[in-house]
Image (cartoon, coloured by chain):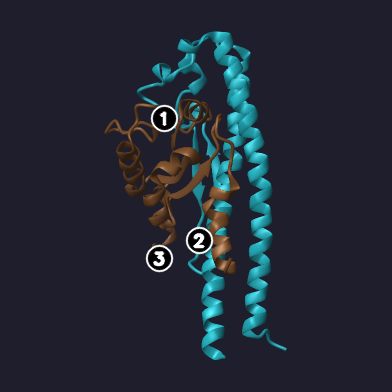
Amino acid sequence: MPDTGAQLTDTKLLQHFATLAQYQHTRERSSAALKQAFFVLAQARRSAGYSRISPDQYSGHAQPIATVNINAMEPDSSDGTMAVARRNEDSGGGVDPLLWFGMLVPPTLREAQSGFVEALDGLVALAQMKRELELQAEAITKSTQENSIKD
Amino acid sequence: MAPPAAHKERTLIAAIGDEDTITGLLLAGIGDIDIHQRPNFLVVDSKTTQGQIEETFTSFTKRKDIAIILINQHVAEEIRGILDEYNAAFPTVLEIPSKDHPYDPSKDSVLKRVQLLLGD
């Protein structure tokens, strides 16, 4: 028996709630990762001195080593992904930004970098889920309107 | 909708936030300064005006090489008007916590949209 319009809308809603739950879970983990990374960065600043870890050290020739790959996304589908891509200097990426802050950096700054790298992966995943939720919401609204016209 | 190939140029992650946030994200490797000397990040401090934040956000949204814009939630509040009007697929805008301003779900536009969808 084919799905009725209402059943199809219900299916879309359930999928939406599942994605939302995943989004909220990832938010919690990402926020915790960021909180820890900020804490370690503060430790690095205390250790090295504030003036050594500040925007004054940002490179004027920065090139990204962390970028995003966007796969194909269809208008009516929540398929398609964004994922972090990392490059090293040998494959055309920029210089490790850790080196902006000197050749000898405190171990805590290296640890902070790891923390932010992990947090960034979570943030890109959140951006992906946000996009999926938006597409799902559009589909649900369209489906609901179509059901209203039929009734 | 633009064909998938149109997204191939969108690879950068831009960021608007306080010093700790930008330093952290730059350490993670997102930093880019293009041939026109345009950075893909903005450090917001006490001297940064609302106009500057709006101008930077708007310029990021118009660039074709940016995939995601990360913005501290407390900074986003200063430009809530233009943020709420922004509805393009790319760049995707994501609000993030800062060291001093934890994530506030009541201000999350994603959750607000879900509430609207459910008619709350």
- Residue A149 lies, in percent from the top left, at 51, 88
Residue furthest to the right: A1
Q: Nearer the viewer, residue B98 or A19?
A: B98
Give me the residue at 50% from left, 41% from top. B73
Say above or below: A87 vs A54: below
Task: Give the chain coloured brown.
Answer: B
What residue lies at 66% left-to-right and 46% top-to-bottom? A26
Residues indicated by labels 3 and 1 sit on the same polypeptide chain: no
From what the image shows, is residue B71 above or below residue A7?
above
The chain ID associated with circle 2 is A
Identified by mark 3, the residue type is: Met
Q: CA distance from mark 2 to mark 3?
A: 10 Å
Apparent colour of chain A = cyan
Residue matched to label 2: A73
Mark 1: few, some, or many residues within 10 Å (few <14, many ≥20)?
Answer: many
Judging by the rendered image, the residue that carries numbered circle 3 is B1
Question: With A46 as the anchor, is B89 left or right in this view?
Answer: left
Q: Which of marks 1 and 2 precedes in the sequence?
A: 1
* Disc 3 element: loop
